[in-house]
Each structure stands twice: as structure tokens, then as C-alpha cells.
Image (tube, coloured by chain):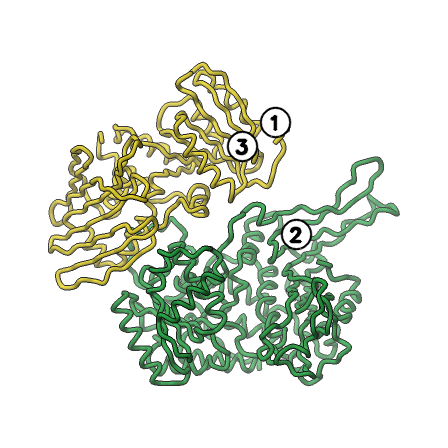
Chain colours: A yellow, B green
């Protein structure tokens, strides 16, 4: 790519602006970007904010395959709009991929959001989840910007499994009145910092928002979380616990156990990366276990569809609203 | 002949929008995300009649495997192969594993997924006419319902010779393996049948009557795999999601339309079938008429299957009957003789296996049709389909009227008409030919092409047509399946041609060497109109 030739275009489907302030995420992001570029040609403008050296001058790098990298210190971020505008391919959608909290104050985010059709973010949630929820709901209310939360997208496979397992009126009604749910997430010894239970938190929030459970309390003990909900038959406890499963990325859910007051039990266990096995035992019947595919969004076509084409879910804002009830988590 | 009565496809529990999740009950699962326009295939058992045939190995099982891979197969699902040969479940599963390994669009086979998927494959040996075989099938299906919670939903795929359709449907009805959809709201049964649906109008009507004595029209899914192709589905998006084309998509701006389905292959091992069918029945009556309707239809009032199919039928009903007294101006046939394909000599049709040495079956057809409605009156639709043509190509070429050339009158300047070319396969693309000035002194004009190529933009391998179609059928979406009146309308148009050809055997003067673009009669048909076939 000729750095002076702003108009050079290959077959191109969209502009993708990637913004992060975390240098450590560069490696993981690049593999995702490579996944995108292989299947869907696009122009990528990668903005790397250097927070360690705030006064570092902005530097542009033109890489092959239509990728421009801009790196610089925080104090120079205000120049970014002037730099990237000429490199955006006209008439094509602009997608914004953030490795940042979209609700956080940031000098460049308002501009990036204003030119983007869709914002995809992948980040840890702050401790004050109630405040985060409130700000997210304000963002979600903006009609001009579609928002995709990768943490939510990661639970897509499990949500589909739930829909397939609880597919009759009776089963859904029973689920609505179960006694306890335990979700296990993978906490294989890892250097990865941050909240590993987020997918589990999202999934149980989704369930509660869909089934009308009333949140009562949440307590954290070491790596465990205990949620108490009020339901028709009494209290429902949802516990989130760590487990260990090799050959599975950390933070992925490994097992879900649902227990009913009559001691019926549903167990959905991960078997491998892309399957779960479902065991159902009621008072009278022990069903033959069956397997279901667990669709990962990180399969090429699915990843692209999830990021750029899938309509934002109606369930998501309600889940965010539910999460806001947890206060400080 | 005109007084056939067809069942209406309105208001039935089976008719559902293609964008909404389908459920045969009124239960709206709160866990289901209705904002996500994905189809939700229902639990069911798919029974494939003729499961030891080519179609099952090449298309059906690989399609099911890929649906499983994409999470689009229902959680509670089974597939039972029904055929005459003696096999166990394990033998069938092993054979299907080989088939998936060979024919699946995704390779290599995922061992974990296969281990799970194969547990859903079963084999049932029986003759198509054996009553006991159907009773045993019923027992097997009931066992599978209990074991796999498939909710007694049934999908019967008739991958057999058309002569068996009636037998199979009758036996299914006799042994209560089919449900009346008006009375059963908690379970369904559907039949998928492959083309050809009949071999002329009368036989199609008879077959329809036989089917509807056991089924409602909404339970019959007539598969035309062209409708499952991405590029064919894109026709609707191209036409109706881009306003710019709508105002020029009519007889004010379009000179003529050419639709070509060319194959470089001969008839291969299908000699026996082809001798009974010919290319008019094999390709024109179904695939080409579908392409024509999609190009010519009015915008539907919604993307609902009923709305789309209504518009397609209107096109078919507006096509002017081919005048038999002048048939040679409107319908040309030919048969390939020895020639060369890709530089290699190939034999003629009459030398192919299982073909009579004096066969008169056509391997090439060219038609000139007119759609007599406000939009298309006076615009000829030229259709051609042929075996052993120079290349494999399916395309729709829309040639626009010439611009007034007085502005660029000069000896060297001849304005080419604009042409919009929609390439269905291979090398899927949409391109537009237009005129541009050649840089330099003077006003020299050169035609150029703007291209959109699927491969350049969407590099991934799209789902195979059968994946989409089987998934749609399990979801109860019949948009991409031919309706009874569509089929009858196209038979009504083409049966007189078939009858004439039957009574007037093909003459060798209509032959064409393999590797050429067809008989000279086809060229003459257009040259009389001052036009030419596109050299693709």
C-alpha cells in the first residue's frame, strides 16, 4: 500500500477502526484481525494509545493488506480525527472495535462513535456495575449506533443450548421455579488477570431477565459469587464457582447444574470445545443423555457475522438492566 | 386442460414468515431471541427414501452434517435411510462418513462432531411397496421419538425415481405416517420431492392429485436446488434492496434478456433418465423458469413465502403461449454430436451409455418467450440450456436499449448497449458493462465492465443449497420451494412444445458438435430479431 495514495482500495467491504489503550492486548487483537482480513477484505485503522508515555508523538505505519497503525501518547489523541479521516474509504460502513470500556470518559471516543455505524467492545466491567449499567443503557438508547458486547456474544452458544433444552412450556415453567443453579467457569491456573466469571454473570443475568426472577442479593466469597433471587416458590440461589478444564480457554463456562425442589436435576456439561452433554433426571425418569453443539463465535464465519452483521439482540438491554441491580460486584 | 383446480396455499399453520421462528404450537419461549432472524428448525425425524442413491451421499448427508456443524440441526433429530439394500446402521453410518469426507464443503471431518452426528443416523431396509416395511418403519420412528424426543414430527424426502412417488406417499398415508395438518397442531409431517414433478402437464396433475389425496399443499415441498443458491437468493436482494434498478427494470429501458444454463459435461451415467426426460424437462421446466420468474416478478408486498410465490406465479401465467404453428421461431432443439471439450475429444449423445443409437432426445433447447404484462410487454426473454457446451456457466444477462448515439457519431465509435450480467455459477458475480472514454485526444469510446465478484468480497464458502433448503423445510418455510400452481403453469407453457417434438422427431440438422454453443437454428432465432447470443 502506497502511504501517500489514500485512494488505493482493494475489494473492500467496510472500514474497521480498532482502538485500544492496552499494549498487552495487541497480540490477541491481531489474531482476531487476521481472522477478519482473511475472510472479509476491509480497511483496518488500528489506534494504539500509549498511556505509559503520554507525550509520545503519533506515528503512522502502513502495513500490507490494507492496515494502518497509529500509535501515540494520550496527549496527542486529539489529532487522531484529522489523521484518520482521509484514510476512510467513502460510502462503506465504519465499524469501531474497542478494547476499552465504552462508558468510560475518553477524549477520542465521542468522535469515533459519531462516525461509526456499529461499536463492538470487549472489556472488563468496572466494579461499580450499577453505574456501568446505567451508562450502557444510555448508550443503547442512541438509535444511530449499534452496540455489540463481546462478552454477551460469548454466551450466545450457551443461550442457544438453553433454548434447545428448555423448549417446551412445561420445561420453561419448571426452570422458572427451580431451586438452585450452579455455573462453573474455567479458572485453569493462568496469568490472565481480571474477572473470569463474567460469562457466567451474564448468562445468569440473562436467565433472570427472561424468566422474571426478582434480584435480592449478591455476595462474593473468594472466587465464588452467590446470587439470591425471589421466585414464586421461594428463593432461588445461583452460585458461580471456578472449575478447571484443560484444553478450554479460561473464563469459558464448563458446567451448569440446575436442581429443582423435587430433586430433579439438569446437568449441562462441556465435552470439548464445541459440544455439551445434557443429562436430565426427574423423580420418575432418567433420560438418555444427549449432546448438543456449542456454537463458538470464534469460528470464522460466525465471528464476522456476530461482529458486523447480526442484529443487536433485544435481550441484551434487559440483561444490562438486570446487571445494574447488583451494585458493586 | 385448463380446468385444473389447485389447492390454495393460504392460511395454514404451515405458512410462516421466513424471518420469524416457527413453532407449530402457540408457546412463545421467553428464552428465544425473536430479534435474531434465524430459523429455528423443529425436532423431527427425516426419512430419506432411496438413501443408497447418489443424492443422499453427495448432497443430503453432507448438508445435514454441515447443519450440525453450524448448530442449525435441531437438538432432537434423527435421519433414517430407507432403501432396498441390506445394511446395518453401522454400515450406513460408515458409508455416510466416507461420503461426508468426500463431498462436504467443510473438511476435514470433525471427529467429535461426527461421533455425535452418526448416532442420529439409522437405516431401515424395505421395498417401497412393502406394507410390512412401513409398519416396521412406524415402529422404528415411534421408538426414536421416545428415545430422542423428536415429537413425532416427520420429514419424508423422496430421493427416488419419480415413478415411486405415488407408491411411497400412498403407503405412508395408508400406514398413518402422514398427518392431516388441519387436525394436528402439535405435530407435523411434510414431504420433499425432487424434480421432475411429472413429465408433462397431465402427469403433473395426476401426481398432484395423488399427493393431495394424502397431504395438503402446504405439506409438499418441491425442491429446486437452484432456489437454495446464494446467487439466486441474491436476485431478490439485488432487485428490491437497490432502488436504482427498479425504475429501469422494464420495457422502456431493457431490450432483451438472455438466460443461459450451460454445462460442459455430457449426460454421464444418467443416460437412462435423460432418455426419458430431455433437457427441456430436466432443466428448462424447473431451474430456468425459476430464474425467469425471479428476474421478471413484481416486488412482493412482503418477504413472506406466500407473497413471493404469488408474484412468481403471476409471471408464469403472463407468459405468452408458444405458437405451435410457428414453433421454429420460438423453440429450437438440438443434440450434441462428437466434438471437443477443453481440447479433448468427447463422444456424441447417441454414443453415450444407455442411450439409443437413434435417440432423438434433445440435449439443447433455446426458447424465445414474452411476458405479456405492463412491465415486460415486447421484451423477448431468450432462454438456452445445453449439455456439452464450451463451458459451464449459468447467467442472466439484461441488455439495455442503446443510448441515442448522435452525440458520439463517428466512424470509429459504435456504442455498445449496457449489459447487466448476473453470474449464478461458477465465478459468482454481478457485472455491468458500460461505455467509457479512452484517455487521450479525441473521443474514442471503449466498453468496460464494473465487477462485483463474490470471491473477492466474501471469501468464505457459502452454505450449500441443500443445507438452506433442508433447514427451511424443518422450519416450515416454503419460500424456496415450488408451489403447485408454479409447477403447473410452467408445464402448461412447455407441454405443447414437448407434444410437438414428440410427434415430430428431431432432425439431425439440429445437431451441434460438442464444444460449440449449440445448433445454428438457435443463432438464427436471434439474428431474425437483429440480436445475437452472448459469447460467455
Mark 1 Cα within 10 Å, few/some/many (few <14, many 20+)?
A: few
Give coordinates of residue B412: x percent, y percent.
86, 46
Residue at 43% from the left image edge and 26% from the top image edge: A110
Image vertical order of residue B254 relative to residue A188, above or below: below
Q: Secondary structure at mark 3?
A: strand
Quadrant occupied by the C terminus of chain A: top left
- Mark seen at residue B248: 2
Same-chain status of marks 3 and 1 = yes
The one of B159 and B39 positioned closer to us in this rendering = B159
Q: Secondary structure at mark 1?
A: loop
Q: Which residue is mark 1?
A: A3
The mark lying in front, picked from 1 and 2, is: 1
Task: Judge whether residue A118 can be spotted in this image.
Answer: yes
Residue at 18% from the left image edge and 62% from the top image edge: A286
Q: Secondary structure at mark 2?
A: loop
Image vertical order of residue B129 relative to residue A244, above or below: below
| Residue B24, quarter of the rendered image | bottom left
Q: What chain does badge 3 belong to?
A: A
User: What separation in Å lies between label 3 and label 2 (alpha carbons)?
Assistant: 39 Å
Q: Is residue B446 left or right of residue B239?
A: right
- Number of numbered labels in the structure image: 3
Q: What chain does badge 2 belong to?
A: B
| Residue A19, quarter of the rendered image | top left
Give coordinates of residue A107: x percent, y percent.
42, 21
Quadrant occupied by the N terminus of chain A: top right
User: What separation in Å lies between label 1 and label 2 (alpha carbons)?
Assistant: 41 Å
- Mark seen at residue A71: none
Give coordinates of residue B269: x percent, y percent.
58, 74
User: What separation in Å lies between label 3 and label 1 (alpha carbons)?
Assistant: 11 Å
Mark 2 Cα within 10 Å, few/some/many (few <14, many 20+)?
A: few
Amino acid at each position: 500500500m502506497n502511504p501517500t495514495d489514500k485512494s488505493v482500495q482493494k475489494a473492500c467491504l467496510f472500514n474497521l477502526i480498532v482502538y485500544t489503550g492496552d499494549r498487552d492486548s495487541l497480540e490477541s487483537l491481531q489474531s482476531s484481525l487476521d481472522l477478519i482480513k482473511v475472510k472479509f477484505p476491509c480497511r483496518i485503522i488500528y489506534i494504539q494509545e500509549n498511556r505509559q508515555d503520554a507525550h509520545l508523538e503519533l506515528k503512522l505505519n502502513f502495513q500490507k493488506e490494507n492496515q494502518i497503525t497509529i500509535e501515540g501518547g494520550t496527549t496527542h489523541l486529539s489529532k487522531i480525527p484529522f489523521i484518520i479521516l482521509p484514510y476512510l474509504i467513502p460510502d462503506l460502513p465504519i465499524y469501531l472495535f474497542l478494547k476499552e470500556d465504552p462508558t468510560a470518559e475518553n477524549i477520542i471516543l465521542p468522535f469515533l462513535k459519531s462516525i461509526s455505524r456499529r461499536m463492538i467492545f470487549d472489556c472488563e466491567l468496572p466494579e461499580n456495575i450499577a453505574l456501568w449499567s446505567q451508562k450502557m443503557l444510555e448508550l443503547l438508547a442512541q438509535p444511530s449506533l449499534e452496540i455489540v458486547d463481546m462478552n454477551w456474544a460469548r454466551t450466545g452458544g450457551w443461550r442457544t443450548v438453553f433454548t434447545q433444552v428448555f423448549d417446551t412450556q412445561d420445561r420453561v415453567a419448571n426452570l422458572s421455579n427451580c431451586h438452585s443453579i450452579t455455573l462453573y467457569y474455567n479458572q485453569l491456573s493462568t496469568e490472565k488477570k481480571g474477572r473470569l466469571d463474567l460469562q457466567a454473570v451474564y448468562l445468569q443475568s440473562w436467565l433472570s431477565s427472561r424468566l422474571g426472577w426478582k434480584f435480592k442479593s449478591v455476595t462474593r466469597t473468594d472466587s465464588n459469587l452467590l446470587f439470591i433471587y425471589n421466585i414464586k416458590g421461594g428463593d432461588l440461589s445461583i452460585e458461580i464457582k471456578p472449575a478447571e478444564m484443560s484444553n478450554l480457554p479460561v473464563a469459558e463456562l464448563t458446567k451448569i447444574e440446575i436442581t429443582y425442589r423435587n430433586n430433579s436435576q439438569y446437568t449441562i456439561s462441556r465435552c470439548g470445545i464445541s459440544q455439551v452433554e445434557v443429562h436430565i433426571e426427574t423423580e420418575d425418569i432418567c433420560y438418555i443423555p444427549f449432546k448438543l453443539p456449542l456454537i463458538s463465535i470464534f469460528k470464522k464465519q460466525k465471528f464476522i457475522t456476530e461482529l458486523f452483521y447480526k442484529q443487536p439482540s433485544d435481550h441484551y438491554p434487559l440483561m444490562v438492566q438486570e446487571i445494574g441491580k447488583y451494585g458493586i460486584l | 386442460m385448463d380446468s385444473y383446480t389447485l389447492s390454495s396455499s393460504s392460511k395454514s399453520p404451515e405458512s410462516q414468515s421466513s424471518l420469524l421462528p416457527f413453532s407449530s404450537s402457540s408457546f412463545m419461549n421467553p428464552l428465544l431471541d425473536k430479534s435474531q432472524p434465524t430459523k429455528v428448525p423443529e425436532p423431527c425425524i427425516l426419512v430419506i427414501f432411496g438413501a443408497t442413491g447418489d443424492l443422499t451421499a453427495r448432497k443430503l448427508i453432507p448438508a445435514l452434517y454441515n447443519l450440525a456443524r453450524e448448530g442449525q440441526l435441531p437438538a432432537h433429530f434423527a435421519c433414517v435411510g430407507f432403501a432396498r439394500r441390506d445394511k446395518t446402521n453401522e454400515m450406513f453410518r460408515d458409508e455416510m462418513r466416507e461420503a461426508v469426507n468426500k463431498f462436504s464443503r467443510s473438511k476435514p471431518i470433525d471427529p467429535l462432531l461426527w461421533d455425535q452426528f452418526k448416532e442420529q443416523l439409522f437405516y431401515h431396509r424395505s421395498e417401497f411397496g412393502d406394507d410390512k416395511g412401513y409398519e416396521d418403519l412406524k415402529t422404528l420412528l415411534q421408538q426414536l421419538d421416545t428415545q430422542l424426543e423428536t415429537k413425532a414430527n416427520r420429514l419424508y424426502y423422496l430421493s427416488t425415481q419419480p415413478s415411486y412417488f405415488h407408491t411411497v406417499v400412498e403407503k405412508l398415508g395408508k400406514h398413518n405416517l402422514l398427518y392431516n395438518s388441519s387436525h394436528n397442531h402439535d405435530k407435523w409431517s411434510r414431504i420433499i420431492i425432487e424434480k421432475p414433478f411429472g413429465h408433462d402437464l397431465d402427469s403433473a396433475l395426476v401426481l398432484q392429485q395423488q399427493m393431495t389425496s394424502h397431504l395438503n399443499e402446504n405439506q409438499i415441498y418441491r425442491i429446486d436446488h437452484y432456489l437454495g443458491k446464494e446467487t439466486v437468493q441474491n436476485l431478490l436482494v439485488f432487485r428490491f434492496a437497490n432502488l436504482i434498478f427498479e425504475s429501469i427494470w422494464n420495457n422502456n429501458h431493457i431490450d432483451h434478456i438472455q438466460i443461459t444454463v450451460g454445462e460442459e459435461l455430457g449426460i454421464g451415467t444418467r443416460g437412462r433418465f435423460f432418455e426419458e426426460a430431455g433437457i427441456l424437462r430436466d432443466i428448462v421446466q424447473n431451474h430456468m423458469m425459476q430464474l425467469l420468474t425471479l428476474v421478471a416478478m413484481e416486488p412482493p408486498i412482503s418477504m413472506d413465502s406466500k407473497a413471493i410465490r404469488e408474484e412468481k406465479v403471476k409471471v408464469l401465467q403472463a407468459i405468452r403461449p408458444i405458437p405451435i404453428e410457428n414453433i421454429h421461431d420460438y423453440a429450437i432443439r438440438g443434440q450434441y454430436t462428437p466434438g471437443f471439450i477443453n481440447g479433448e475429444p468427447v463422444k456424441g449423445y447417441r454414443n453415450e451409455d444407455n442411450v439409443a443409437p437413434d435417440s432423438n432426445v434433445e440435449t439443447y433447447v433455446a426458447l424465445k418467450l414474452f411476458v405479456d404484462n405492463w412491465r415486460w410487454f415486447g421484451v423477448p426473454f431468450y432462454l438456452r440450456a445445453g449439455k456439452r457446451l464450451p463451458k459451464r456457466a449459468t447467467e442472466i444477462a439484461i441488455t439495455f436499449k442503446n443510448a441515442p448515439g448522435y452525440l458520439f457519431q463517428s466512424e470509429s465509435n459504435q456504442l455498445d448497449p449496457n449489459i447487466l450480467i448476473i453470474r449464478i455459477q461458477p465465478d459468482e458475480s454481478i457485472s455491468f458493462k458500460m461505455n467509457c472514454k479512452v484517455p487521450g485526444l479525441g473521443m474514442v469510446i471503449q466498453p468496460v465492465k464494473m465487477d462485483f465478484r463474490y470471491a473477492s468480497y466474501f471469501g468464505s464458502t457459502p452454505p450449500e443449497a441443500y443445507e438452506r433448503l433442508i433447514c427451511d423445510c424443518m422450519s416450515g418455510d416454503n419460500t424456496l420451494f415450488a408451489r403447485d400452481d408454479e409447477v403447473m403453469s410452467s408445464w402448461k407453457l412447455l407441454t405443447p412444445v414437448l407434444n410437438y417434438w414428440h410427434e415430430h422427431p428431431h432432425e439431425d440438422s439440429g445437431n451441434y458438435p460438442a464444444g460449440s454453443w449449440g445448433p445454428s437454428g438457435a443463432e438464427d432465432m436471434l439474428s431474425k430479431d437483429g440480436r445475437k447470443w452472448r459469447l460467455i
